[in-house]
Image (cartoon, rainbow, N blue to C red):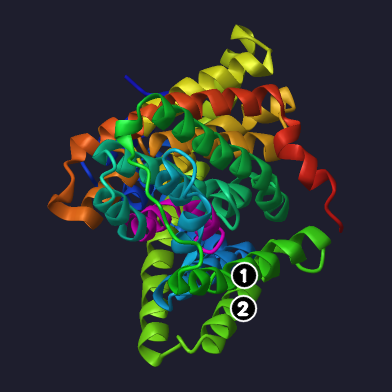
Amino acid sequence: MMLDRVDIGLLSIFATLLLMFLRMPIGIALGVSAFGGIWAITNFTAAIGLVRTVPYSFVATWEFSAIPMFLLMGYIAGNTGVTRGLFVGLRNACRNIPGGLASASVLATALFSSASGSSLATAAAMSRITVPEMLRAGYDKALATGTVAAAGGLGSLLPPSILMVIYGIFTGAPIGKLFIAGILPGIVTAIAFVIFITIRVSAKPALAPRIQLDPGEPIERAAWADIWPLPVLILSVLGGIFAGLFSATEAGAIGAVTALVVAALRGALSWENLRRSILDTVKSTSAIFVIAVGAALFQRLMGLSQIPNELSSALMAFSDNPYVIIALIAVVYIILGMFLDSVGIMLLTLPLLMPVLNSLGIDLIWFGILTIKLLEIGLITPPVGMNCFVLKSALGSQVQLSTIFRGATWYVALEILLFAILVAFPQISLFLPSLMAG
């Protein structure tokens, strides 16, 4: 029996998911399934032709240059200790509130996110700084690790976010507006985490023994003095985008140069640190580009198969209410988030969802923030909550993986509530972009 193009497209989606579950790298799984599907729908020559032309034409996109630049900025900040003293200063500021160390961890993670762009990198860096200190202070292990795992998701929501760059490229949404749109939702999320920690620890003080610090202690004053590099980095990137002085792509280069200058002024820029930062950037960029190329081929397959149009028609027949459709998408994302990583989920689903979003007239900036929020939830849901695995890798035998997941589960419900708030009040995401110049 001959299969029509819709059947071939569905089989290709199933094959992609199967290969991902079997732990084949995401980019390879997308590319292999796409090649096979395109071959089946057209012919071998056409499939080979696309494999030859799509990778170069797609990766040569100007906007993609922002990814290595933002990664370089984050690695320079991390490897040269630009964020050193951040947690110490915030710990001192939060010393008098219940669960102060955990709240300081959330705020420090939020600030570090603005120099990182990656949830996994943020979680890895902050887990080594904040969790050991909370454990030494007698904090509950699940509270300490779960807080950092959940707060690490801010690395995707707060700009400059690598996921936002990829989303913008695949949907055509302005990346600069996506960056600015993530600011208020990121701040709301951080504040909600702090309030949640305060309420929970107030109800059960044994979770987080209160510590007393001397604000006049020299190390504390030094720590506050050491915080200045991060606001400089944030303002150099986001201030220029908001004021319309440069694009989000140009902001990546400006951020990387600013990180180099700040590190040099602090006397922390060595050839070894620079070499390590460049090498880390090359590795991460290569991995992202392989995934992006696979996703570009997969997008071509979806276009040929007509599945996105069929899906759009089916969903519109089911309901033309945007909120109902968003609720259905949220359920799918949360389920996929239990098994797949963030980039894989986004690049697998966007080619299918774009016709639906366009048919309903859903604002792509708003939906981008909702997408990132859903991907945040996936980073802490078992069995494949990547941030939890990152913490386990960083902490070794100090904490069991089950303990990290138990602590992070408290934040899943909170994140779903925050997602509902962002759906109900789109202006939280859209207000700042509406004020942008240029």
- The answer to the question of whether label 2 and label 1 lie on touching residues, with beta carbons closer than 8 A, is yes
Q: Is residue 174 above or below residue 431?
A: below
Left/right of residue 410 with respect to residue 171 in the rendered view: left
Q: Is residue 121 magenta?
A: yes
- Quadrant into which the C terminus falls: bottom right
> Residue drawn at (58%, 68%), measured in percent from left and top?
230
Amino acid found under the numbered disc labelled 1: Leu
Q: Identify residue type, mark 2.
A: Thr
Give coordinates of residue 217: x percent, y percent: 45, 69
| Tag 1 secondary structure | helix
Position of residue 22 measured from the top left corner of the image (x, y, whole percent): 20, 40
Numbered circles on residues, count? 2
Residue closest to the eye, 38 or 352: 352
Eyeballing the image, is 142 above or below 277? above
The magenta span reads 108-127
Q: Residues within 10 Å of mark 2 (few under 14, many from 20)?
A: many
Is 41 in front, or is 271? 271
What residue does disc 1 label?
Answer: 233
Q: Please indicate, yes or no, whether residue 339 appears anywhere in the rendered image.
A: no
Dot 2 corresponds to which residue? 258
Circle 1 crowding by C-alpha within 10 Å: few under 14, some 14–19, many from 20: many
Q: Quadrant of the N terminus?
A: top left
Residue 211 lies, in percent from the top left, at 37, 49
Kindly identify the residue that appears in the image at 29 percent across and 42 percent down. 139
